[in-house]
Image: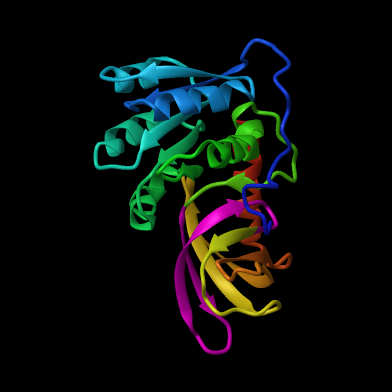
Amino acid sequence: MENALGTAVLPRPNGGKKSSARAALVDLKEPVRGLLTDCFRQFGIESVILSGTANERLKKEKFEACVVKLAPTAQPVLETARTSPSNSRMVIYGLGGSAQDALRFSKYGINAVFREPLERPAALKLVKATQMLVLHELRRYIRIPVITEVSATFVGDNRRLTTTSIEISSGGMSVRSAEDVTVGQSMEVSFSLLTLPRVWVRATVSWRNAAGKSFGVRFDDQDQRRAKIKEWVDSYIDG
């Protein structure tokens, strides 16, 4: 899980085939709109431009993904998407915003964020890393990119940490943090995910990246509370 987005999935060339999924680009302006349209097209995903009628269309039409700028105006769009029977499990990309913005909207289960200023190589890398989630070509061991608030309490010194997730699987998760941790360190983590109420589970630090900006934890196999996480992951994949 160390390379959080770059190794999550493998690319599948479009090969000229008709798009099998649609991504709604909500109130985006050029040149960002054109750049994202081109990036999604390369992976067989059709972009649909939504503006003033975005909320109504998200209620009535099925989309596999959407891109929303992380600003105060995003909340009604995110609320509509996550409460729509057709789009409640769509992949949601945030555009821009700060870490605080991502946290503010974390209850909506934002899957990944395009950083601003948007650059083609970074945008392509992010779409490549999440395309199978959009196209519903998932395997049981898939790691789901999702941004949500994570609280951790370290065993031994009761040190506490609040951070954000990068990816989650039934066996563990990666988080974005510069906290000083060591592999093998024990903790208890808690978080909530869309339809999953806040859950607490024992975990162990399993890796830390060389840059010191993120680390991964492995959930304790003996902790029965882990079953709720597995159920949610399986449901998300099957949905």
Point out the stretch of residues depicted in magenta.
Answer: 148-172
Residue in the foreground of this view, choosing between 120 and 69:
120
Confirm whether residue 86 shows in the render.
Answer: no
* Left or right: 168 as drawn, with respect to 101: right
Look at the picture and state if 100 lies above or below 47: below
Let me know if residue 211 appears in the view: yes
Q: Would residue 80 be found to the left or right of residue 145 on screen?
A: left
Looking at the figure, which quarter contains the N terminus? bottom right
Q: Residue at x 46, y 37 (%)?
A: 93
> How far from the left and from the top, in percent, is residue 64?
53, 25
User: The C terminus is located in which quarter?
Assistant: top right
Residue lying at 62% horizontally and 16% vertically, measured from the top left? 20
Q: Position of residue 88 (x, y in %)?
A: 46, 31
Measuring 56% from the left and 25% from the top, which residue is drawn there? 40
User: In the rendered view, does 188 fall on the left or right side of 25?
Assistant: right
Residue 189 lies in what quarter of the image? Answer: bottom right
Secondary structure mainly formed by the magenta segment? strand
Write the residue at 32% across / 26% down: 27
Depth check: 115 or 132 in front? 115
Vertical side of 155 occupied by 142: above or below: above
10 to 202, vertically: above or below: above
